[in-house]
Amino acid sequence: MLQRILRHFTARVLTAGLGFAVVWLTARYLGAAGRGQVSLFLTDVSGLALLAGLVGGSSLIYLVPRRNVWLLLRPAYAWGTAVSLGGAAIITLLRPVGPAYGLHLAAVALIQVLLSINIMLLLGRQREQTYNLLTTVQAALLALALALAYAGAHWLRIEAYYYANYLAYGLPWGISTALLLRLPDAWAASPRRGRASARELARHSRGAHLSNLLAFANYRFSYYAVAALAGPAALGVLSVGVALAEAIWLVPRSTALIQYVALVNAADKRGQTHAALRGSRLTLLATAGAVLALAAVPAGWLAAFFGPEFGAAHGVILALAPGILLNGAGMQASTYFAGVGRYGVNNRATLLGLALTVPGCLLLVPRLGIVGAALSMTLAYTAATLYLFGYYRRAIGATWADLLPGVPDVRWLLATLARRR
């Protein structure tokens, strides 16, 4: 598992670096207000993609080892299309955005949802290298397209970001579709089997994905609060600070994803869980190191790199740092409960966080601005993680000390890496 995690982590580091390039390009060439526009569009797309996951999402990974790919793909595609088109129409009606925004939102959300379905199915069949390659190609295409548009063609408009997304998600979607067609699964045409699979997928997805929707509200309610109470320029600065801080999550997310795939495919769930405990402790240690390194970056460096308006992102990073560390640790516990089908624990933890995020933003943003938004997020992450850890410790029969890294873990990692060399 450690080798698989390291390979996946390497791919995620590359993807995160490309994502960082996208943040830099949009901040440097569009300024704080333009970066705020990009952040709102990306948040809208992400929200629609999560709603589409109510019939699909990570449940595809859970079901596809035992089900025909095509019986799962068809209901997931149908629901994803309906959500992307219908959701974009509702946003266009409720928000002061033009029809052009709605059309781009529908198209980008749809192609992102379809690609996500494809790669989840491939990952569920343990095509981890394919998953890593496709996600890396997608990030590289987006960064390259924006670099050509902004630095090459000097097309400094939000529309360039829309069209770059068509290329970045469209080409990997075509490749992933071709790879699905090469799987040995027979084309399943039975209407009765199709309806049964659709009901099973929806049943699993509702429980598994509700926590993802609630987590999205936790992560991004502050964006809408800042946009409404402080304006798009403030949102642009907040989004840069949050993007830098959340990049650290590539460490726990890499570990959590591989552990989830291993857990849902394991016959001995308890044995697999205890085998993953050391990986979780090492993940927490690596996350703490990354948080400290990011917090040490001076505000002047941020202003020099992103532009004068973005020095204030340093305050966001400092306010977010404890929450980033704790939520990264909580991902390991959340992965366990998703892998064994105990979605209620994750949902309650995220609801607790959301119950603190909303009033926290409404109270702190008018007083402290973007730092207040970051503090409300940290408060929510702390409460949710402590709740998760309490249940996780009892579920696997571990003590609090078992969850925390120590000197033996570091020695074991160094010895393992030395043997690989």
Image (cartoon, grey):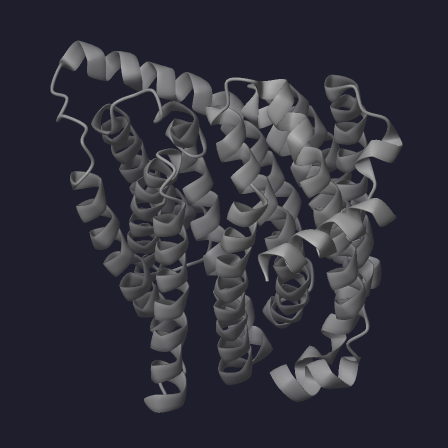
| Residue at image location 45% in from the left, 46% down from the top | 94
Task: Looking at the picture, tell me which residue is in the foreground, 130 or 134.
Answer: 130
Q: Quadrant of residue 187?
A: top left
| Residue at image location 60% in from the left, 69% down from the top | 236
Tell me: 246 left or right of 396: left
Residue 399 vertical placement versus 162 (above, below): above
Q: Quadrant of residue 127?
A: top left
Tell me: 318 left or right of 223: right
**How many marks are shown on the rendered structure?**
0
Is residue 140 in view? yes
Q: Quadrant of residue 256?
A: top right
Residue 372 vertical placement versus 268 (above, below): below
Is residue 40 in view? no
| Residue at image location 59% in from the left, 45% down from the top | 2
Whole-percent x and y of residue 401? 88, 34
Whole-percent x and y of residue 213? 54, 36
Task: Looking at the picture, tell me which residue is in the foreground, 118 or 323.
Answer: 118
Residue 33 vertical placement versus 344 (above, below): below
| Residue at image location 48% in from the left, 66% down from the top | 38
Whole-percent x and y of residue 159? 35, 72
Tell me: 254 left or right of 140: right
Whole-percent x and y of residue 97? 42, 59
Task: Looking at the picture, tell me which residue is in the foreground, 345 or 341.
Answer: 341
Tell me: 288 left or right of 246: right
Q: Quadrant of the N terminus?
A: top right
Q: Quadrant of the C terminus?
A: bottom right
